[in-house]
Amino acid sequence: MSLDIYTYIYVYAKSHCKYIYVYMSSAVGKKIRAIRENLGMGRQEFADTTGIPKGTLIGIEQDRHEPKAGVLEAIADHWPEYAAYLLTDNTSVKQRNPELEALAKELEDQKNAS
């Protein structure tokens, strides 16, 4: 993998309260456009819905610049079903919540201790 083609982006994952280190290809603009078009939305409607300025959206879709973490977060917040595709191209991942897993483990430990 060449760092000329890929850019590191920190993506804040609200549910995990941690930063995740991911690779984001320059094709992310094409992915955002594909998501927007699949939703049947024009740029203005998508911008209004997500809060992403229309000019920023155009620049991202035309691969003039990479989206900041806030842009990716806004899209994932509105359409979480596209989050894995947007970040990794992997659409077969099982989403996990470490906070719920920790709570389940704590409850299991309490049950076993009784």
Image: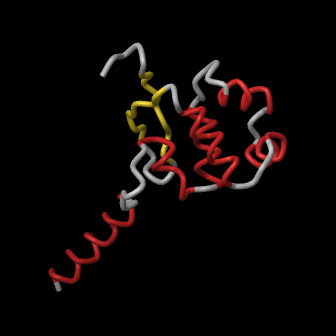
Find the residue positioned furthest to the left: 113
Considering only vertical position in the picture, is 16 above or below 18? below
> Which color scheme is applied?
secondary structure
Which of 79/4 is in front?
4
Query: Residue at left 59%, top 35%?
Result: 30
Considering only vertical position in the picture, is 59 above or below 81? above
- 27 with respect to 79 (left or right): left
Residue 96, percent from left and from top: 37, 60
Residue 6, percent from left and from top: 42, 22
Considering only vertical position in the picture, is 31 above or below 103? above
Residue 87, percent from left and from top: 46, 41
Which of 11/98 is in front?
11
Placement of the N terminus among the 4 image quadrants: top left
Find the residue positioned furthest to the top: 4
The image quadrant of residue 5 is top left
Query: Residue at left 69%, top 47%?
Result: 36
